[in-house]
Amino acid sequence: MPKIVNHELYRKELLSKCFDLFAERGYSAITMRQVAESLGVSTGTLYHYFPNKKALFEQLVEEICERDVSLALTELEGIQTLKERLEVLGRFLVKKQDYYVKWTYVLVDFCQHLDFKEMHGNDVFQYANKQYEQAFYELLGIKDRALVWFVMSLIDGLFLELLMNNDCISLTEQFDLLGKMITAYLEKYQSSDQ
């Protein structure tokens, strides 16, 4: 009797193993053949699930985005105040710092191979941005879009600095400062609305 394969589960399993490959070798330096060899599958199997390296990477972006959002929301479950939420988010990012630095490297490497139009027309990045934006509304418990994007941009910038080995950056210090800044901003903004 032939083995029944859950193709979606198998595709996700393959994707989960690809992150480390891209982080170790870089997007540009690895071929589909090398990916297949590293995963222990034939190139035909890999091409069955992913038509090319770009499609594989874009599906990896979607998968990582969904997983990151889920993990962060779980971490913050039950936390009520914005100050506490930022503290927990900061600790979460510190705990996963190496992972996010690697992910920043992989994303930068991938983006080097796209022109400006491709970057701005890329549905996967638009999807990921919307997912992260929605998650940050929930994570922070605020509806101020500019403030959400400020926090997201700050986090991206922090990991880019850490990627460049800037040892002056402390995520813990930055999140402490961020909590104070957002609290002061919201107090002023909310009191001026009344």
Image: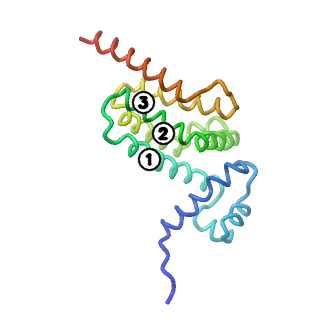
Please state the horizontal and vertical placement of residue 84, each as a whole percent of the image.
Answer: 37, 30
| Residue closest to the far bottom | 1
Other residues around mark 2 within 10 Å, as few (<14) / some (14–19) / many (≥20): some
Please state the horizontal and vertical placement of residue 36, each as a whole percent of the image.
Answer: 68, 65
> 132 left or right of 49?
left
Mark 1–mark 3 distance (CA, rounded to whole Å): 15 Å
Which sits in the foreground, 17 or 35? 17
User: In the picture shown, does residue 16 fall above or below 118?
Assistant: below
* First reached walking from the N terminus: tag 2 or tag 3: 3
Residue visible at 37% across and 33% down?
A: 137
Other residues around mark 3 within 10 Å, as few (<14) / some (14–19) / many (≥20): many
> 193 left or right of 46?
left
Residue visible at 41% across and 35% down?
A: 136
Residue labelled with disc 3 = 86
Residue labelled with disc 1 = 71
Q: At label 3, which amino acid type do we have?
A: Leu
Q: Quadrant of residue 110?
A: top right
Which is closer to the viewer, label 1 or label 2?
2
Which sits in the foreground, 45 or 76? 76
Mark 1–mark 2 distance (CA, rounded to whole Å): 9 Å
**In what element is the residue under mark 2?**
helix
> 188 left or right of 177?
left
Residue visible at 45% across and 39% down?
A: 132
Residue visible at 73% across and 48% down?
A: 28
* First reached walking from the N terminus: tag 1 or tag 3: 1
Mark 2–mark 3 distance (CA, rounded to whole Å): 10 Å
Residue labelled with disc 2 = 92
